[in-house]
Amino acid sequence: MLVGIREEINFEIEKMVKKYGLSYIDAVLHYCELNELDPEYLGSIISKNPALKEKLALEAEDLNFIQKTDRLPL
């Protein structure tokens, strides 16, 4: 059941990013507001979704919210 919730949340966040041009961070916060969820609760769900977690981490690094990690050049 939790897997279905994770997929639904991921789908809704991706939809907001594409439809409204929001950043992933803004889309997550907007999703929390719309569904009256605590961002910390959603964080525990996002941590189990590697694709969304990576997108949020890259955005946070670009905004200097978190320390940049070393990456291999592609």
Image (tube, helix red, strand yellow):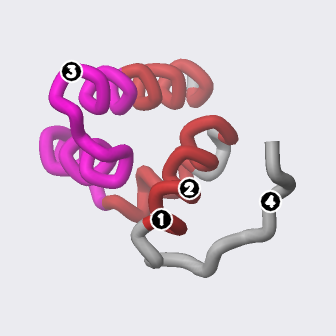
Which residue is under mark 1? 62
Above-or-below relation of 58 to 30: below
- Residue at the (53%, 68%) spot, across then down: 61
Quick one: label 2 or label 3, which is nearer the N terminus? 3
Which residue is under mark 4? 71
Residue at mark 2 to residue at mark 3: CA–CA distance: 20 Å
Which residue is under mark 2? 58
Count of all numbered marks drawn on residues in the image? 4
Residue at mark 1 to residue at mark 4: CA–CA distance: 13 Å
Quick one: label 2 or label 4, which is nearer the N terminus? 2
Is residue 55 found left or right of 18 in the rendered image? right
Q: Is residue 27 magenta?
A: yes
Residue 18 rendering spot, x and y as whole percentages: 29, 23
Q: Is residue 53 magenta?
A: no
Q: Secondary structure at mark 1?
A: helix
- Residue at the (46%, 29%) spot, across then down: 10
